Image (tube, rainbow, N blue to C red):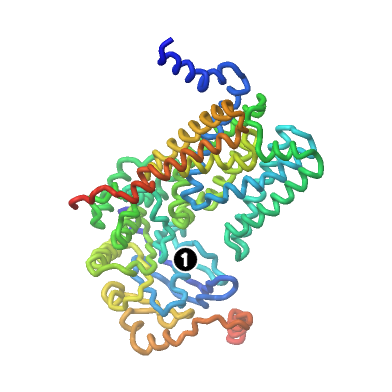
Amino acid sequence: MSLTPKIACMFTDVFVTPFADYEFMRRALVGSLALALSGAPLGVFLILRRMSLAGDALSHAILPGAAVGYLVAGLSLPAMTFGGLFAGLVVALAAGAASRFTTLREDASLAAFYLVSLALGVTLVSLRGSNVDLLHVLFGSVVGLDDAALLLLVGVSTVTLILLAVFYRALVLDTLDPLFLRQTSPFGEFTPFLFLALVVLNLVAGFHALGTLMAVGVMMLPAAAARLWTRDLAIALPLAAAIGALCCYGGLVFSNETSAPTGPAIILAAGVVYFFSMIFGRAGGVLRLKRPRRHLEG
Amino acid sequence: MSAAANAPAIRLVNLTLGYDRRPAVHHLEGEIAPGEGLAVCGPNGAGKSTLLKALAGLLTPLGGDIHFSGLSPRAVAYLPQVVDIDRAFPINVRDFVAMGALARVGLFRALNAGEQVRVGAAIETVGLVGFESRTLETLSGGQMQRALFARLIVQDQPVILLDEPFGAIDAATIDDLLALIARWRAEGRTVVAVLHELDIVRRAFPRTLLLARECIFWGDTRDALCEKNLVRARAMSEAFDERARECLRDEFDAEDRLHVH
C-alpha cells in the first residue's frame, strides 16, 4: 500500500468515521453547529457594545432557574429550560432597571445580580442531587442530546437568526448611537432588551449542550477572532458563525480522539483559533500592528 | 425642502428642568418663533445643554411644559454636545449620514433612490466628497463634525438643535458650518444653538437667550450680550445648595394672582 491512500484512510478515520458510525456524534455536531451559527453573531454585537463580560454574567445568572427546574422535575428539558430562561431574563431586566433607576452603572448591577444568582443556583443544586448533576448543569453533555434538546437548539438558532436579520438596523443604530435612535424612533428604548433576550435565549439553549459556563465561549471566542480579521460588520457576522462552526467540528473530533470532555474541547478549539487570530489577524493582529506595511504616498 | 416650511413655534411655559429634583433650569418662560435663529449662551453649568435635551424630548421637565404648536415634538433634529458615538464602530461615512433618514425610512425598509440622492447631496454640501467609504475612526475631529452636520441635513427637520457645535473646530470649518446654518434659516427652519463663542453669536444669531440657571435675558442678541448682562450671568452660583428647600415659587405666584384678582 502506498503512502497516499494510507494518509487518506487515516484522515477519514479521524474526521469522518466517528460521525458516520455514531448517531450521538451526529447529534452533537448538529446541536453545536446550531448553537455556533446563532451565538457567534450575537457575540460580535456583545463585543461592539462593550458587553463582552455581560454574556458571561448572564450565563451564570441562568443557573438558579435551571436548578429550580431540576429540583421540581429532575433532569427535564422543558422545566430546566423555562427555569433558566426565566432567571436569565429576570436578571437582565433587573440589571437594566437597576442601572436606570439607581446610581449604579449597568456592569456593577449586572455583576451584583449574577453573583447572587450563581450562589443561589449552586445552593439549590446541591440541596438535592449529587455533584454529577451539578456537573451536568455546569458543563452540559453535548454527546447526550435527545430529540427534544436538538429541536430546542435548532429552533432557538433559527429564531435568533431571523430576529437578527429583521432588527439588524435597530441593533446597529443602538450600538453605534443609542441617543440618536432613542430620539428618532420609538423603538429605541426597546432594542437593548430585545438584544439581551436573544443572548439569554441562546445561553439557555446552549447550556443543554455545553453547560452554563461553556455556552458563552461559543458566543465570544469566534466573535473575538472574527473581529481580528475584518473591520466590516457584514463580513464579521458570517465569519464569526463560520469560525464557531469550525471550532465545534474540530472540538468534537479532538474530543473523540482523546476522549476529552466535549464541551471544553469545543471551547479550547475556539481558543486556539482566537490565539492564532491574535497573532496573524489582518485587522488588529500582533504581527500586523508590529510590522505595518509601508505607508502610502498620500 | 418640504419639512422646513411649517416650523412650529415652541413655547416654554414656566419650565423647570433638572436631575434628581435639583433644578438646572429654573422657571423659564418664553417663545421661539418659527424660523428663528436663537443662540443659548451662559457660563458652564447654566443649564444650556439641559434645555436642549428637554427640547429634543430626551428629558422630562420637573415642572412646567414645552408646547410645540402645530408639529410633533419628534420633528426635531438634535446634535448633542458629547456625541455618544463609538468611533471604532465599523461603519462608513455614507451609511452614517444615511442614518438621518431613519425617521422617514423606519427600521425595516430599504433606502430608496430619492433618499440615496439626498445622502449624496448632504455629503457634498458639507464637503466630504471622497470620504464616503472611509470609516468613522479615520476621520479627524472637524471631518466628524461635518459628517454629523450631513446627518442633520438628511434628517430634514423643521427644528434643529445644536449643542456647542464648534468646540475644537478650525476657522474654515466653522465658516462652512455657519453658511449651512444660514441656509437652514433661509429655508425657514428654526435653529437653536448652545454657543460659547460670542463673536459667532453676534455674527450668525439674531436672538439670544442668556441663561444662568434662570433666564438673565431673552431677546435681541445685541441687547442680550451687553456687559451688564454678562456680568450678571457670570455671578451665577454653580454649586448645589446641599440644604436647599422645596421651591415654592409656583405657589407664591398663584397666591399673587389670587391677591390681584
Relative placement, left or right, of A24 versus A229 is: right
Q: Residue B111 in the image: x percent, y percent? A: 36, 42
Front-most of residues B160 and A16: A16
Image position of B121 with respect to A261: above or below = below
Rendered image quadrant of residue B161:
bottom left
For the view shown, which residue lies furthest in the right direction?
A: A128
The answer to whether any part of residue B222 appears in the image is: yes
Q: Quadrant of the N terminus of chain B?
A: bottom left
Q: Residue at x 61, y 43 (%)?
A: A200
Q: Residue B181 in the image: x percent, y percent? A: 29, 64
| Helix, strand or loop for disc 1 | helix
Which residue is denoted by mark 1 in the rendering? B53
For the view shown, which residue lies furthest in the top direction?
A: A1
Could you tell me which chain the residue with mark 1 belongs to?
A: B
Q: Residue at x 34, y 50 (%)?
A: A289
Image position of B29 with respect to A248: above or below = below
Q: Residue B16 in the image: x percent, y percent? A: 53, 74
Numbered marks: total: 1
Front-most of residues A182 and B155: A182
Rendered image quadrant of residue A34:
top right
The answer to whether any part of residue A158 appears in the image is: no
Q: Residue at x 66, y 35 (%)?
A: A140
Q: Residue A192 in the image: x percent, y percent? A: 54, 50
Q: Quadrant of the C terminus of chain B?
A: bottom right
Q: Residue at x 65, y 51 (%)?
A: A91
Amino acid type at image mark 1:
Lys
